Amino acid sequence: MVGIYARVSTEEQAKHGFGLKDQIRECRKKAGTTECKEYIDEGISGEFLDRPALSRLRQDVRDGLITKIVCLDPDRLSRKLMNQLLVTDEFDKRGVELVFVNGEYARTPEGQLFYSMRGAIAEFEKAKINERMTRGRREKARQGRVLRDFKIYGYGYDKETAQIIVNEEEAAVVRLIFDLFTKPNSMVKGINGIAIHLTDKGIPTKRGASVWHRQVVRQILMNTAYIGEFYQNRWNTEGMLGNKHKSPDERVSMKERPREEWILIECPPIIEREKFEYAQKLLQDSRRRWTKKGVHQYLLSGLLRCSDCGNTMTGRRSKNWGKYEFEYTDMKNTAGAKQKGCGRKVKAQNIEAEVWETIRSWLEQPNEIAAAAEAENVREEIPYEQIELERLEKEIEKAKEGRKKILSLFASGMEIGEEEVRETMRSLKEKEEIATKQLDELKARMKDAKEAQFNHGLLTEAAEYYLSKNSDELTFEDKQQLIRQLVREIIVYEDHIEIFTY
């Protein structure tokens, strides 16, 4: 029986318009018989050998069902010379006649050479197509165009402008996720709690699934697109196209490109930068903060660190003079621990009472605490600082332009002394360096001001949550969440503690 093999990929279909029906018609004409079995691979690249229809054809050849194969062109069999020769050799060994519509395949040294040359040219053409497409996509990205719809939750894609736009319905859910993660509340606890909450509320994911997984929530919390920074050319997906045709151990994984190769595309922000950065800090600490519950719960779990050895201090029950009591210690008994600890111990009841009393005093007078912090760290002359920012940026640009003009005049042959040029260049460079240093200091002060305002907001939100409840009604979970909302870490010294806030 005669076997007809046809293949077309989406890319070639669009470029040449020579579809499957055309291939099959030409192959039937070449075969000269109606008794043909068709093997068709639609929308599959010729770069890979493992294709459903080609695999069936090879198996039928091995079983002796096919005695002749008709194909439009050698590059239909494969776009890689090595694979093309492998399949051809496989057919030859079983005495199967291989016929091409476009050109004859002769079993002679000359015929083999010509066949190999055509295969090499086909492989080269495929590589050039990929190179041009990659270069074209990268250039479009550099021009600020978003290449496709990347399916980012909270955003849509405008094909006409090739830009990311806000999907208000989903954006509201994104804001809810960040609020639930960064603000004290009675509804959820941690990333897993947020995923369960969204599932229970019947909110669909971007792909329309009814169940939210914690990893999806984590990815949303870490996505910089929500502060207006979307990166293209970040991931190298070379070789991944054929993963579905490969065994799990042969599949190519996606790799991150070097940071300098990323292409930044600005998009409309959904989350304030300060809140996003705060969420990142919480995520970094979440592993030790949200540990599995033991028999006894510890109010300061994941927050304490020894000042001497640097180990985190974990809660445990110990026996002292025949009486059991709870304590925090820096001792690590697990195998492979890098630092066993220096043996510092502190009674859980005492340190928990001290920390909670400090937090409670903050929550009962948030305005006074915030005012003291602002007086110490922040100047209130933001309008002046904005003017100064613009002035320094202009001064830096002016110094750069001055240096360019001096070099241009000197290169044009004007009668300017070399020493005079050097002195002028040195003076302009000094001005630029001084202005740059002042600009960096100013930006740091302005950032401190924003962070102070955000921290004030954190304290106010926590205070509102605290004051909305009767202090006697506060549960252990309420206290723990309020402490974690405000405290980044607590350093334990021999005779005192030091509390670090966000």
Image (tube, helix red, strand yellow):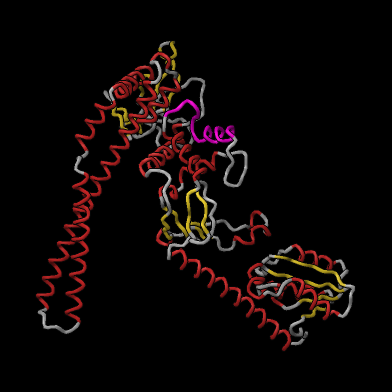
Answer left or right for 79 relative to 142: right
Between 321 and 284, the one lying in front of the other is 284
Q: Look at 33% across and 30% down and name the residue there.
A: 459
Q: Is residue 264 part of the magenta span, yes or no? A: no
Residue 220 appearing in the image: yes
Which quarter of the picture shows residue 57? bottom right
Q: Is residue 470 above or below residue 342?
A: above
Q: Which residues are magenta?
A: 184-201
Q: Is residue 187 magenta?
A: yes
Q: How many marks do you count on the picture?
A: 0
Q: Quarter of the image containing the N terminus?
A: bottom right
Please tell me whether residue 259 is drawn above or below residue 471 in the rendered image: below
Going 47% across and 21% down the picture, which residue do you hit? 297
Along the viewing direction, whichever of 106 and 444 lies nearer the viewer: 444
Residue 392 position by quadrant: bottom left
Residue 243, position as x, y percentages in the image = 64, 58
Image quarter hosting the C terminus: top left
Q: Position of residue 413 (x, y in %)?
A: 16, 84
x, y percentage for residue 471?
38, 16
Can residue 304 be seen? Answer: no
Q: Is residue 81 toward the left or the right of residue 131 in the image?
A: right
Q: Residue furthest bottom?
A: 110
Give x and y (percent) for residue 84: 70, 74
Residue in view at x 41 percent, y 11 percent: 321
